[in-house]
Amino acid sequence: MPERPGPATRTRRVCAALRALRKNNRLTLHQVAIALGVSVTKVQRMETGRRGLRADDVTALLTLYQVPAEERAELLALVRPPASPGWWQAPGSRLPADLRQLIGLEDEAAVVRDFELAMVPTLLQTAEYARSALGGMDHRLHEPDLGRQVAATMTRQMVLSRPMPPSLHCVVEESALHRPIGGPGVLARQLQALCLLAERPNVTLRVLPLSRGAHPGLRGSMTILEFADAPPLVRVPVAGTHTFLQHTHEVDLAREAWQVLEHLSLPPAESAHLLGGYAGELACAS
């Protein structure tokens, strides 16, 4: 029996279906809003899922669009919350909302393509490296919240070890391998861990040499999340948090940038050799 898709994927599937149904019925947002007695803004939000979806709102739309009973039941089932929420949604997790959203999407993704400009990718970080990175990026973050986010980072990484894990493709700029987050010892152990992680069949790690000069990644880090049954998303950092791009042209631009970054990067074997050399140098120095 196939797994039921997670909350983020379910919402996006319903939103895509609602947009398609409206267009198939040749109705404008304004006409739908008048028919339902709501604002155009509310209809737009229902088609984007920006504030979540309510079963009664979706029911009203499906009734307006005269959706057959079987399809109607399938879409409404996707709107209702799952019986077993993910660990990141558990009461008391106290994780930031944007982090909970990202974890949910990572859990649902079939392929994750992550470019990092300034540090080691989160899904490949050691606990001590993650603690130093999180604390350094936000000096307001103290215990117990710091420890909670480090623990969440470690738990997120379990997605790479589960049955049928996602494929993780990482490109890291060489500068990140020289930034002594946590000090030389922490960085040395982090690079050693990268060498081991890169041997996993579902992990591909490439280093982008500084000698390549300018490249599309100088605009900032990005993560492309691809799903088996939903359109892809692109995560980009914004003012201490992140946002998700989902319009086709935005995703296409991100994929083009990714292809350039991969082309400029060292092959996985050469990248692993470079990582091992840096790790050895740091271990001797520390």
Image (tube, rainbow, N blue to C red):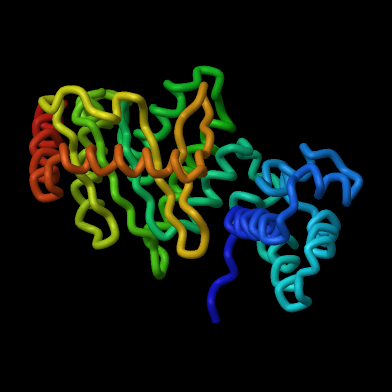
Q: Nearer the viewer, residue 276 or 256?
A: 256
**158 and 35: which is toward the camera:** 35
Residue lying furthest right in this view? 37
Left or right relative to 243: residue 50: right
Q: Is residue 161 visible?
A: yes
Quarter containing the N terminus: bottom right
Which one is nearer the viewer's eye here, 86 or 268? 268
Kindly identify the residue that appears in the image at 52 percent across and 21 percent down: 239
- Residue 17 position, x and y percent, is 65, 60
Which quadrant does the C terminus fall into? Answer: top left
Task: Tell me if residue 1 comes above or below residue 99 in the rendering.
Answer: below
Question: Most extreme residue toward the front, as rendered?
Answer: 26
Report the side of 250 relative to 194 (left or right): right
Quadrant of the rendered image containing residue 125: top left
Residue at figure coordinates x 29%, y 50% from the top left: 169
| Residue lying farthest to the top in this orientation | 139
As displayed, is residue 48 above or below residue 208? Answer: below
Question: Residue 181: percent from the left, percent from the top?
Answer: 31, 25
How many marks the image carries: the answer is 0
**x and y percent of residue 266 in the render?**
12, 41
Q: Residue at x 37, y 61 (%)?
A: 161
Q: Report which quarter residue 59 is drawn in.
A: bottom right
Residue at the image position 72 percent from the left and 42 percent from the top? 44
In which quadrant of the rendered view does residue 99 lie?
A: top right
Q: Position of residue 195 (x, y in %)?
A: 19, 47
Q: Is residue 90 above or below residue 281?
A: below
Left or right position of 91 against 234: right
Q: Is residue 126 visible?
A: no
